[in-house]
Image (cartoon, helix red, strand yellow):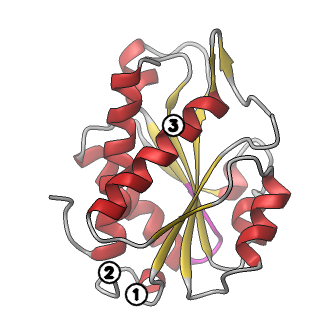
């Protein structure tokens, strides 16, 4: 696309998406809903929206766990080839239904240029309807201390958290989350708004 205003996204020509929690890991659970199942639905829908609007998209095979996903990406892409994003749902107690349903976040890497992408995506998510409490954080602020997804993939990588499992989980809401995620990714990658 090469029309992004963001330095690290000016050369990549493909967006690579991965649904978080592969290898039969359910991720966060709010019975009967499982993060893994919802991450796959959202990832596939984001890919459809982006492809329909002219973005080249690759999807990491859903059966791969974290290590397999990273190996799959690193076997196909190097820094500058692609922008890779792993899509998750979040989990926390004590949030209002609206906050839990619409609060999104993005983890970024250690460089200022990665942070610029994170800040841009956060603003875009909010402008497309995400909760005002949506956030952009360095991967060192995650519960894991550092995220292998961001540290071990060769291309520039970010991790999206799209709403909380304790919020809405119906199909219409998953479609909405996919739409705002696709809008933010499209805006960051192309420098244009999604039609």
What kind of element bears circle 2? loop
User: Marks 2 and 3, how far apart in space?
Assistant: 27 Å
Instruction: Give the magenta range.
Output: 107-111
Which residue is rendered at x = 56% and y = 31% of the image? 38
State the quadrant of the C terminus.
Answer: bottom left
Up-down relation of residue 101 to residue 194 (above or below): above
Q: Where does residue 91 sit, x and y in percent of width and height? A: 62, 26
Which residue is rendered at x = 47% and y = 19% of the image? 169
Would you name the residue on which mark 2 appears? 4
User: Marks 1 and 2, how far apart in space?
Assistant: 5 Å
Tell me which corner region of the image, top left, top right, bottom left or bottom right, holds residue 168.
top left
Q: Where does residue 107 sit, x and y in percent of width and height? A: 58, 55
Q: Residue furthest left?
A: 195
Would you name the residue on which mark 3 appears? 41
Up-down relation of residue 120 to residue 154 (above or below): above
State the quadrant of the N terminus.
Answer: bottom left
Q: Is residue 131 visible?
A: no
Would you name the residue on which mark 1 appears? 10
81 within the magenta span? no
Which residue is rendered at x = 36% and y = 73% of the image? 189
What kind of element bears circle 1? loop
Up-down relation of residue 190 to residue 7 (above or below): above
Q: Where does residue 112 sit, x and y in percent of width and height? A: 53, 77
Q: Which badge, 1 or 2, is on the more N-terminal residue?
A: 2
């Amino acid at each position: 696309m090469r029309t992004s205003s963001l330095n690290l996204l000016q050369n990549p020509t493909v967006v690579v998406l991965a649904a978080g929690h592969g290898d039969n890991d359910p991720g966060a659970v709010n019975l009967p809903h499982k993060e893994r199942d919802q991450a796959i639905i959202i990832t596939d829908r984001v890919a459809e929206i982006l492809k329909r609007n002219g973005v080249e998209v690759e999807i990491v095979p859903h059966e791969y766990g974290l290590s397999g996903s990273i190996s799959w990406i690193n076997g196909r892409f190097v820094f500058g080839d692609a922008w890779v994003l792993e899509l998750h749902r979040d989990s926390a107690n004590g949030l209002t239904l609206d906050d839990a349903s619409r609060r999104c976040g993005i983890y970024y890497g250690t460089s200022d240029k990665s942070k610029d992408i994170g800040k841009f995506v956060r603003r875009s998510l909010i402008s497309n309807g995400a909760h005002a409490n949506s956030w952009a954080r360095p991967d060192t602020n995650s519960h894991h201390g550092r995220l292998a997804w961001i540290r071990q993939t060769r291309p520039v990588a970010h991790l999206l958290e799209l709403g909380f499992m304790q919020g809405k989980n119906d199909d219409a809401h998953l479609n909405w989350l996919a739409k705002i995620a696709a809008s933010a990714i499209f805006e960051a990658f192309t420098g244009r708004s999604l039609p």
